[in-house]
Amino acid sequence: MKSNFDFTLVGGTFVSTANRFEYENIAAKYANSFSFGSKIAIWFTPTIAFEGGINYTQTPLQGKNLANGQEIDASLFFSALKIIISPDENRNIQLGGGFGLVSSAFDLYIEGDTHPAFVFSLAFSKPLSKQVHIYLGVEDYIHNVFFTYNGYISKEILQNDLLFNIGFTFSK
């Protein structure tokens, strides 16, 4: 896998590890859901790359005493710019770190927002042919979240949003 350019299509699972917000007797967390996205990597050396990626998921926000028992649907967009390091030229293992954004939009009550994030990743690649590889990876978006409702701004909560992905990498 000694290409200079990789394009990866992924699908997988979004997992939120903490409450999205807490307010008086209300607490809510995103449900686990399907996600999909893509990544582009430019390899400057056989073991170091710059990668940009996006992912999307639609997930219900669920919790106790939330919206009179209604589910609130959220659309989440994840974007990242990372440095990728592989221990060898085959790039079977890839470690990444960088910065990203997590953007949200809701269908009821809550205003959408965008938060900066630190992003860390671990991926494995297995060749199917010279130019096609199976991709298996996890990304961790670490960021603080808050919400606004009727002029109230909640306290910030540290959030880890995990994306578990499987897909195909096309190398050139």
Image (tube, helix red, strand yellow):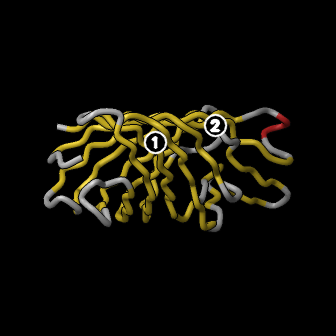
Circle nearer the viewer, 2 or 1 = 2
Q: Nearer the viewer, residue 159 or 148?
A: 159
- Residue 74 to residue 119: above or below: above
Q: Nearer the viewer, residue 144 or 2?
A: 2
Q: Amino acid at mark 2?
A: Ser
Which residue is found at the position 37% from the left and 62% from the top? Answer: 96
Q: Is residue 61 left or right of residue 119?
A: right
Residue occupied by mark 2: 33
Q: Circle 1 sits in a helix, a strand or a loop, which is it?
A: strand
Which residue is found at the position 78% from the left and 54% from the top? Answer: 27
Q: Is residue 113 left or right of residue 169?
A: right
- Residue 67 to residue 141: above or below: above
If the image is split into quadrants, where does the C terminus sit? Answer: top left
Q: Looking at the image, tell me whether mark 2 or mark 1 is earlier in sequence order.
A: 2
User: Picture coordinates of residue 155 (x, y %)?
Assistant: 64, 67
Q: Amino acid at mark 1?
A: Phe
User: Picture coordinates of residue 17 (x, y %)?
Assistant: 67, 57
Q: Nearer the viewer, residue 128 or 78?
A: 128
Q: Report the disc number at residue 5.
A: none
Quadrant of residue 85 in the image?
bottom left
Q: Is residue 16 left or right of residue 130?
A: right
User: Picture coordinates of residue 22 (x, y %)?
Assistant: 74, 59
Which residue is found at the position 37% from the left and 65% from the top? Answer: 97
Mark 2 is surrounded, within 10 Å at the Cα level, by few (under 14), some (14 to 19) or many (20 or more) other residues, namely some
Residue occupied by mark 1: 77
